[in-house]
Image (cartoon, helix red, strand yellow):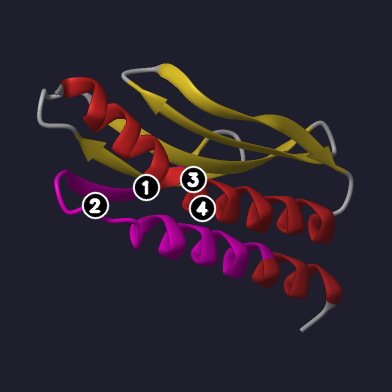
Amino acid sequence: MDSESLAAAGLLAAMSRAAVSLADLHHPFVRSVPFSYFFPPAGARAGTAFTLPDGREVSFTVSIAADDGAFRVDGAASVEGEALLTLPPRTAESIGDGVAVLDDYAAELVSCAARLIDRLLDELV
């Protein structure tokens, strides 16, 4: 493979890692559904949506997109569109740097997911 193909394969692998780590999020008291999709013009998003007992949806998402010659990476946790945790949008000039940020953001969301869901469940009682 040439260097561009290797970079593309690296991006696909990173998005797959993020999708799997977020899809593996589970909580014993709430239902979850993983998702991943592409968005125009050149982006991908992965995450998991949880449905709380009161019907509200909590989502944990990461995305990476090509934007003006660079890669923009975002990560967030939200409930019904209201931010619980917003990781600062980062722009990376190289695909390697973008992949590193994507991996970090997915790991950060996974590490705080149970705590955030528990906090929301505690508010219900």
Distance between mark 2 and mark 3 Cα atoms:
12 Å
Mark 2 touching mark 1, by CB under 8 A? Answer: yes
- Counting from the top left corner in percent of width and height, residue 38 is at 47, 44
The amino acid at mark 3 is Cys
Residue receiving disc 2: 27
Distance between mark 3 and mark 1 Cα atoms:
6 Å
Residue at figure coordinates x 38%, y 17% from the top left: 81
The amino acid at mark 1 is Ala
Vertical relation: 83 (above or below) 16: above
Label 1: element kind: helix
Left or right of 55: which side holds 107? Answer: right
Give the number of the disc on residue 111: 4
The part of the image, by quadrant, that contains residue 88 is top right
Of 37 and 49, nearer the camera is: 49
The amino acid at mark 4 is Ser
Mark 3 touching mark 1, by CB under 8 A? Answer: yes
Count of residue discs = 4
Residue receiving disc 3: 112
Residue receiving disc 1: 114
